[in-house]
Amino acid sequence: EVQLVESGGGLVQAGGSLRLSCVASGFTFDRYPIGWFRQVPGKERREGVSCISISDGRSDYADSVKGRFTISTDNAKNTVYLEMKSLKPEDTAVYYCAAGGLPSILEYEYDYWGQGTQVTVSS
């Protein structure tokens, strides 16, 4: 059974940093690309933030987070990280990691989802 467990969310002031973790299990770690998404209450769709192809390390970012967020992996720990710096109030959301078929920041490409972790950035 594929499982994705996020952690690392919390409350931080604007300009601060957080590192989110996504621990994957139930599949060979480099089988699926991993994406990070976020969802604001009241919005139906999740916004793609970043993704990484575990097999070759290629990554992509949404324009809104380029230069501030960094995605990385620890293959020995089956873990994908999202390092978030210079956080803004508009980054406030529930952050999800997902595993899917293609490395993309498009929600529909992903089949498996974690439960999410709340990130709140105060002004």
Image: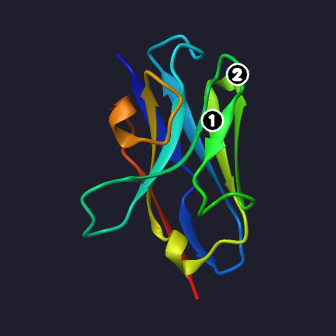
Locate residue 19, reporting x and y percent.
Answer: 67, 54
Vertical side of 32 occupied by 46: above or below: below
114, above or below 14, in the image = above
Task: Examine the image and state in which quarter residue 11 appears.
Answer: bottom right
> Residue 93 is drawn in which quadrant?
bottom left
Determine whether, in the image, residue 90 is placed left or right of residue 69.
left
| Residue 68 coordinates in the image, percent (x, y) | 72, 62
Location of residue 6 with respect to 78 vertically, above or below: below
At label 2, counting other C-alpha atoms closer than 10 Å, the crowd grade (few under 14, some 14-19, many 20 or more) is: few
* Residue shown at 27% from the left, 65% from the top: 43
Q: Quadrant of the C terminus?
A: bottom right
The picture quadrant where one finds residue 23 is top right
56 vs 51, left or right, is right
SS at badge 1: strand
- Mark found first going from the N terminus, 2 or 1: 2
Image coordinates of residue 2 in percent, x first then y, are 39, 20
Total tally of numbered discs in the picture: 2
Q: Amino acid at mark 2?
A: Asn
Q: Residue at x 70, y 22 (%)?
A: 75
User: Which residue corresponds to mark 2?
Assistant: 75
Label ID, residue 80? 1
* Residue at 37% over, 41% down: 107
**Are the two marked residues, 2 and 1, in contact with CB atoms closer than 8 angstroms?**
no
Mark 1 surroundings within 10 Å by alpha-carbon count, few (fewer than 14), some (14 through 19), many (20 or more): many
Quadrant for the N terminus, please: top left
Amino acid of disc 1:
Val
Kind of element beneath mark 2: helix
Instruction: Give how far across and how far down residue 28 sits, in percent.
Output: 54, 10
Between 58 and 99, the one lying in front of the other is 58
